[in-house]
Image (tube, helix red, strand yellow):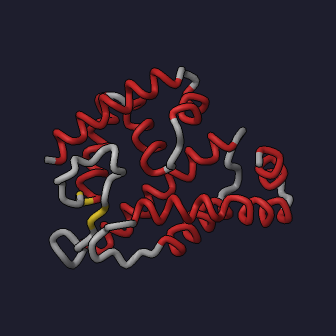
Amino acid sequence: MTRLLTDWQSGDLAAGDRLIRLIYPDLRRLAFRQLDGAAQVTLQPTALVHEVWLKLDGADRLGCESRAHFMSLVARIMRQIVIDHARHRSAGKRDGGVRITLHEQLRAPDQQDLDVLALDQALYRLASIDKDKARIVEMHYFGGMSSDEIAAVMGCSAITVKRGWRTAKAWLREQLE
């Protein structure tokens, strides 16, 4: 995958085609997980993946060095698309009917679906307090990345990522209640 990323970023369109075929199932699973259980969401997983790819394909230089860096970028783009979609939907309605379920590890068993805009605002507040923890949440939740992958991107240990994830989950639960 790293070789395909490098070749694609160098202008090899065939490498881009091979790359999307390689990662499409992973991106689709990630999109489905993010949108699963969301009430009244008109954005479908396939549409989310295609929007991500369009944004990636339109970028001049991604600067991705590895699969982990690429998935970190995908996480950020997916978050932006979901939030933009929610904002657009809520323009004519109070909450837009857009609800998203956080990954089971963030959710309490009896917790209702969370408002994606509230989650985004909470992540911005978290970033103003601790950017690293906000990045961990973004990469883990929106990018589906493991602690090891996040650690590679952030240049720290997996245990540091796990501690940050636990702290961020607790903080977000409190903010979103």
Q: Nearer the viewer, residue 126 or 102?
A: 102
Left or right: residue 158 compared with residue 36: right
Q: Nearer the viewer, residue 148 or 125?
A: 148
User: Residue 118 falls in which quadrant of the image?
Assistant: bottom left
- Tell me the residue at 64%/47% (across/down): 70
- Tell me the residue at 71%/63% (across/down): 20
Residue 145: x percent and y percent?
53, 43
Left or right: residue 16 compared with residue 82: right
- Tell me the residue at 63%/59% (across/down): 56
Residue 48: x percent and y percent?
50, 69
Left or right: residue 34 compared with residue 39: right
Q: Is residue 55 above or below residue 162?
A: below
Residue 111: x percent and y percent?
18, 53
Q: Is residue 122 above or below residue 116?
A: above
User: Residue 94 falls in which quadrant of the image?
Assistant: bottom left
Residue 66: x percent and y percent?
70, 40
- Tell me the residue at 23%/73% (across/down): 96
Q: Nearer the viewer, residue 175 or 81?
A: 175
Q: Is residue 128 above or below residue 142?
A: above
